[in-house]
Amino acid sequence: MVKPFVRCCVVLAALSVIACSRSSGPSTPDASATTAAAPKKPPRPRPTPAAGETPADVKASKIVLTTIKDRDTTSPVMITIPLFDGAATLSGTGSARLVFDLDTIETGIPLRNERVRLVFFETTSVGWDTIEIAVPQIPAPVLAAIKDKRKATVVKLDAKVKLHGKESAVPLVVDVTREGERVIVKSAAPIEVKISELGLTDNLRRLSALCMHDSIDDVVKIDATIELAP
């Protein structure tokens, strides 16, 4: 009876380590406390779009974050964050707003989901469970091209990203196409953001130590797909 019990313990320990993509190393003393499931939050109601706004299709919209761990460029970690809410004004003085719910991130491994949410993003803190992206102005020639030519490529936009109560300016380069009444916006090239510039270096170190990684890159590449539909 002893050997099956020992084997079971070994398998469970191995699964815990693999979940953070590391095959060996000592366990972290506070790992269970750090990654304990947070209390479930009540459903977040989606705001009603303002007059003149075209709402985003949240089921078809997302951003994908790619980062490199342990200097292994062949197996990057990919984090998908679905869109929670968003809309754009495509006439007059154009603008756009997007909100991503960090409690819904998906890395492909449940334990890693919890660790990224709770240790890196600290989503249990008030107001820290979303990423907000705002484009205060969409240039008139871009809006005209979307309407008349039904596409606009390599569009440069000045965006503001709000995370953990801090706002940062981030340049975006996107391609826009119109299919019927649906407008599809995709990043023309990965958007590069430095974790250090977002003030999350300490959180990154804690996550790296918890998951027993030698390193996690400071640069995160972001690919976005946003669809707007009346």
Image (cartoon, helix red, strand yellow):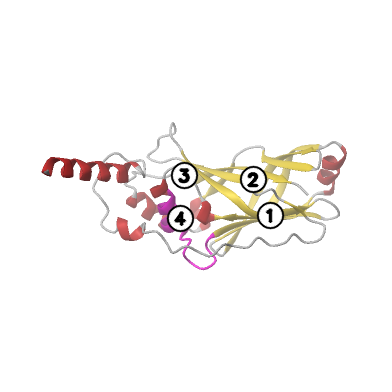
Tell me the CA gap for discs 1 and 4. Answer: 21 Å
Going by the numbered disc 4, the residue's amino acid type is: Arg
* Residue at 19% in and 40% down: 7
Q: Which residue is tagged 2? A: 61
Tell me the CA gap for discs 4 and 3. Answer: 11 Å
Going by the numbered disc 3, the residue's amino acid type is: Thr
Tell me the CA gap for discs 1 and 3. Answer: 23 Å
Q: Which residue is tagged 1? A: 86
Give the farthest residue toward the left: 2
* Lateral position of residue 75 relative to residue 211, left or right: right
Q: Give x and y (percent) for residue 25.
A: 25, 44
* Mark 1 Cα-neighbour bin, 10 Å: few <14, some 14–19, many ≥20: many
Q: Which range is magenta?
A: 113-129
Q: Would you say residue 126 sits in the magenta stretch?
A: yes
Tell me the CA gap for discs 2 and 4. Answer: 20 Å
* Lateral position of residue 218 relative to residue 169, left or right: left
Going by the numbered disc 2, the residue's amino acid type is: Ser
Q: Secondary structure at mark 1?
A: strand
Q: Give x and y (percent) for residue 105.
A: 51, 50
Q: Which residue is tagged 3? A: 107
Disc with the residue nearer the chain's start (4 vs 3) = 3
Q: Which residue is tagged 4? A: 117
Disc with the residue nearer the chain's start (3 vs 2) = 2
* Mark 4 Cα-neighbour bin, 10 Å: few <14, some 14–19, many ≥20: many
Going by the numbered disc 1, the residue's amino acid type is: Gly
Tell me the CA gap for discs 1 and 2. Answer: 9 Å
Q: Secondary structure at mark 4?
A: helix
* Mark 3 Cα-neighbour bin, 10 Å: few <14, some 14–19, many ≥20: some
Question: Along the line of sight, which residue is nearer the eye, 189 or 108?
Answer: 108
Are the residues flagged by discs 2 and 4 in contact, CB closer than 8 Å? no
Say which quadrant the N terminus sits in.
Answer: top left
